[in-house]
Each structure stands twice: as C-alpha cells, then as structure tokens.
Amino acid sequence: MPKIRAVFTDIDNTLTSPVTHQIPASAIWAIEQARQNGIKVFAATGRNLTAYGNGPVAAFDLDGYVTVNGQLCYLPDGQILRMETFDPAVIEATLNLGSEHGFFTTFLEKDQVYLNGINTPVEEFYKIINTGIPTVVPDHQISREAILSIVPFVYEEMDALFEEALPNCQVVRWNPYSCDLAPRIGGKDVGIRKMLEYFEISMEETLAIGDGGNDVSMLKAVGVGVAVGNARPEAIEAADYLAPDVDDDAILKTFQQFGLI
C-alpha cells in the first residue's frame, strides 16, 4: 500500500461523538499531530460550513474543506476549487413532493441555510448537529439557482420515493430523520478528486473515514476507506477497515494504525 499523504474525515458522528455531539480531544490532538508529520487533513462533510463559520472544526486548522457532499470545495484562504449547484427542476420537484407528502426540507446555499417548515424530524435533526434551526422561509423565497444541497426531513421508508421521483439524484442517509440529495454524478468522492488534483496527491495515497450513506462513495474511491464502529451498515460494507466507536478514540487509533502519528 502506498504511503498515506492525505486524510478526509466526515464530521457528524465521525469526528463528533454521537453521544456528546462534540469532537473528542484525542481526535483534535491526532489531527494536529498528523499535520505536523506532513499529512494533509481535510473535512469531507454534508454540512455547509461556510454558513456556520466552519462549525465544529472551527477550533483547529485543516488543509481544506469538501462540503455539502462534494458540491462546495475550498481552501482555508477561501479559494473555491469546486462549486456546483442543483438543476432548478430538482428544487421544484422536491418542493412539490413535500407539499404532496407533508414533509419539510432544508436548502443550503453557499453562505446561508434555510428551510420551509418545522416539525419533529426537523427538531431532532438539529439537535444532532447542534447548530440551531435555520430561518424558515416560504417556498417562493427558496432559490432555484443557488442551491448546493437539499435535505428533506423524512424517515427511511421515504428514500425509495425520492429515488423513483428524482432519478438524476443520489439519495444518501446518515441519520434517521433526514436524507441528503446529491446530483447523480456528484458526491464526496468527486470533491475529493478535485482537492487531490490541486495538491497533486493520488487516490491511492489517501485515507477517508466516515459513518454514513453519504460517505460510501469516498470510502470506495480512496486507497483506504475506514468506517467508525458506530457507522451505518452501508458504510461498514464499503470500508476496508473498521475503527472503534468515536467515543473509543476512533480517529486517534485509526491514525496510529496507519502510521500517521
């Protein structure tokens, strides 16, 4: 196996604890040590970090950010390497499905996040990511041109409906309260490739670690895919290595296992 030169890590339930929703001190220390050892470390998340001041990873330095499932990728100085918005028709179709089936949706632009209603799944989801519930806006105020990510608040039995109704989208899930929609040709793997091109690092020299359905594409694409112990079954199946649970120092032990620190 080639020497690992780059690491991409999911945030929610991978860096952050599913119990405390905080990043364990051992993970922060491991990332800092790996970077001191010359390893490039990146966030690879479904979150929109530009709308929240980098969220949980604002407390320490990273080498770049693959966000909103690969749709927005940028460097610490703000230089954008990739930004791809949804086809307006997908926005309309999602809103129509919401009206028909009684669910609400969060829409993410580059610098703002909003949704079109609040119910129990919405409240439970925002407890997980600990950001507070975004502004509620009427459907007519939702952009049709600038949306980078779509997060419908539906339970898992609705996923098949989206797959049928939106054939140009991937439907991926990392929590019980919502799914993420991504373009069929998008995903974290696409964003990672763009980031690696910039740094002239190969996929074979890259390790990725995650826990959810939206991590599957990157776990399959890189040289070493790692699923944390509390991961969803599809992430575990896609991974080459199963780490301990997040609260059992998953990041630290993974970095030690592969000689990064």
Image (spheres, helix red, strand yellow):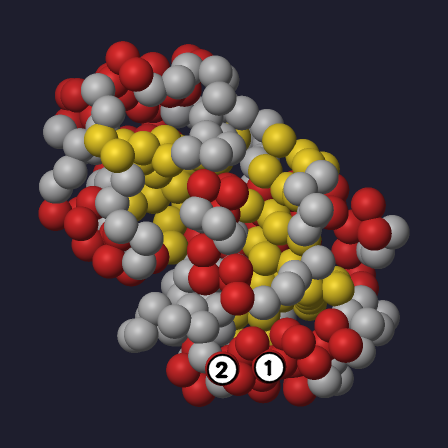
Q: Which mark is residue 25?
A: 2
Q: At 22% across and 31% down in the image, what residue appears?
A: 136
Is residue 203 visible in this depiction of the protein? yes
- The answer to which image quadrant residue 208 occupies is bottom right
List the residue tagged with mark 1.
29
Callout 1 amino acid: Trp
Where 103 sits versus 259, above or below? above
Q: At 46% across and 30% down in the image, what residue appears?
A: 109
Q: CA distance from mark 2 to mark 1?
A: 6 Å
Q: At 41% across and 34% down in the image, what residue appears?
A: 112
Assign a secondary structure to mark 2: helix
Callout 2 amino acid: Ala
Where 148 sits versus 142, above or below? below
Where 140 sits versus 69, above or below? above
Compared across the picture, whether 92 is left or right of 216 comes to left
Task: From the top left corner, tell me how far across and down residue 178 is, in percent.
Answer: 29, 45
Front residue of this view, candidates 98 and 235: 98
Q: At 53% across and 25% down in the image, what residue appears?
A: 85
Task: From the top left corner, tell me how far across and down residue 94 is, in percent.
Answer: 31, 23
Front residue of this view, candidates 36 and 163: 36
Where 199 sits versus 68, above or below? below
Pick the quarter of the image with the N terminus: bottom right
Compared across the picture, whether 225 is left or right of 123 comes to right
Assign a secondary structure to mark 1: helix
Q: Which mark is residue 88?
A: none
Pick the quarter of the image with the C terminus: bottom right
